[in-house]
Every structure is written in structure tokens, then in C-alpha cells.
Amino acid sequence: ALLWLLFWAFSTCALIAQVPGSIVDSTPRAKADAFDGRCDDGFVWHDSGASACNLEDNAGPRCWRCAPPRYSLDVRFVVALFVFYWTNETIIATGICVLAGTCGIWWQNSSQQRRDPAQSRSALICAVRNTFLCHLGSLAFGAAFVAFVRVVRSVLAWLQAETAKSKNRVVIAILMCLQCCLWLFETALKYVSSKAYVQVALKGTPFCTSAKAAFFLIASHPITLATMGVLRRPLRWIGVAFIASLSALFGFLLLRWMEPTAAPLLPLLVFSVLGYIIGSAFMNLFHIVSDTILQCLLLQGKWIREPSAPPPPTP
């Protein structure tokens, strides 16, 4: 992930640095004309070799030119931003699908098979194969929706920052309301999409079909899912705080054993940050696994109550 982030940042910087020279008028100007706001899109530079530099007129020698800006945020940057968001969301969706597929296979196994490490490895391999060979298109299609909304929000945030310079409060208020609405829509879309990725892994259906099934699953069990959502956040923070505190404690004891006279403040900070990162990753896995098992349980309960309903998922 870090290598991808560095590659995207380097390629995007190289892309936006390619500014066309026609964006500003580079004809020689007098000093007064060059600094009167005509070069606001770029910067002014002194061209001592200009042919008109030694010619005198009413405005003075024309030794100044307008140069294009250092970078340009145009459609190419918007496309690069969309690619960045799309890739990130696809990676997240792929991880959810692999974990959900593994849990779905584990759910279908017998009690004896669940305790067999070989069966667990086989479930993981099968889930990875299904994700990359069968479901990658559905995951990328769903991730594109979230990426598009995030790009629109970023563009609105840029427009708001540009509008703030003119101090137009009406336009700023409209843009803030639009950003708030898009934030709510993005949050709901991410929630439904995460459930849809689980449906893709469990049933093998396309994204749109899975999103529809996930929406009706949420609508038919609002209390159960709301309870899980309320309990998940405090459990997450408790788990992350416990892992980070335990990492800091063991790091402090190890430091005292190896270097009793060393200052513990900086090492404790490093241990705590590493523990927070590890705890967040672990609790994210716990969130996906618990969500998958809950959906398996709800789908199995529906099949038991309604014999005409589709059978439980078999990834």
C-alpha cells in the first residue's frame, strides 16, 4: 500500500507539472504591465535577452514575461484522483470479499472440519481463488461508485476553498450543504457496499444484485443490525486501546530489561503507535468476520422460516 501511494504521488506530481505554455501570454511586457495582475495564472520573470528589452517607449523597456504556473489542476488531476480512490476502494473490497468467503466456507463446514487447520487453509485458498477469478469485476464495479462520490466531494471542497477567496457567503453555504449531503450519501453507500461485498462472496452474485439483497437484508433486520452497529464502535475502541496498552507495557518491560537507564518516553510512544496500528487492523478483521457470520445466520434463519427461499450460501 505504501509503495502504491508513493507511485501515485510521484506520477500525479509529474502529471500536473506538465503545464501547457499557452495558458498565459508570454509576450514581452513592461515592468508595470507585468505586475498589474496580468500574470496571476503564473509568475513574472525577467528576460534580459528579449529583443524588446533595449527598446524604450512610454511604458519603459519590455524585459518581463509571464511564465506558466508550476502546476495545473485540470481534468487530468481529477482522473488521477479518481484512479487513486478507485484503487483504494477496490483493495478494501477485495480484502472484505476474501475474508467473507473464508468465513462463509467455514460456516458450511462441520464442527470437526472447523477445528482442522488444513480445512482452514483450504477455505482461505478457495476464497482467494474465487475473489480474483470470479468476483474481481463486481468488486471493482462497486468500488467505482464510492470513488466517484469521493471525487465529487473533493471537487466541491476545492470549489469551496476557491470561493472563500471571494467571500461569497451564499455560494459557500450552498457548497457546504452539498458537501454535507454527499457525505451522508457516501456513508450510506459505503455501508451498503460493505454488506454487498459480503453477499458477493457468499452467493457469487453480481454487485447490483448483491447490493439489492444487502439493502433488503438491512431493511428486514433493522434492530439486529442497528444493535450490532451500536456495540461495534465501543468494542472496537476497547480492543484497540487494549492492544495498544499491552504493546506499550511489554515494550516498556523489554526496554527496562535491555537498557535500564534509557529514557522510556520516545520508545513508549513508538510502541503505542505500532500497537494502535496493529489493533486497528485486528479489529477491522473482527468487524468483517462478525458481519459475515451475522449475514450467514440471518440468511440461514430465512431459509429455515421460508422453505421456498434460496438455500444458505455455499461459497
Image: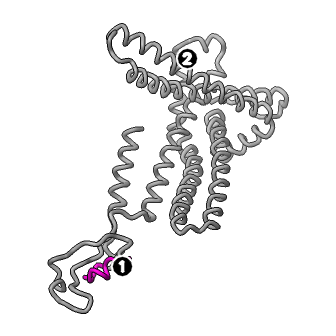
| Amino acid, disc 2 | Gln
Q: Position of residue 1 (x, y in %)?
A: 42, 38
Point out residue 242 in the picture as x, y percentages from the top left corner: 56, 19
Q: CA distance from mark 2 to mark 1?
A: 75 Å
User: Residue at horizontal 67%, vertical 42%?
Assistant: 192
31 is within the stretch colored magenta: yes
For residue 49, what is the image quadrant?
bottom left
Residue located beneath label 2 in the image = 119
Say whether disc 2 or disc 1 marks the residue closer to the N-terminus: 1
Q: Are marks 2 and 1 in contact (CB under 8 Å)?
A: no
Q: Label 1 is placed on what type of residue?
A: Asp
Magenta segment range? 26-38
What is the residue that sits farthest to the bottom in this orientation?
Answer: 58
Q: On the picture, is 39 further left or further right than 163? A: left
Quadrant of residue 62 in the image? bottom left
Taking 248 as reference, is 134 above or below it? Answer: below
Above/below status of 294 relative to 91: above
Residue under the point 36% across and 79% down: 36
- Residue at image position (59%, 54%) is 149
Which tag is nearer the camera, tag 2 or tag 1? 1
Q: Is residue 47 left or right of residue 270?
A: left
Q: Name the quadrant containing residue 25.
A: bottom left
Residue placed under numbered mark 1 in the picture: 36
Percent of width and height locating residue 298: 76, 29
Mark 1: secondary structure: loop
Coloring applied to the structure: one colour
Residue shown at 30% from the left, 75% from the top: 66
**Could you say which is closer to the camera, residue 266 or residue 88?**
266
> For the C terminus, which image quadrant?
top right
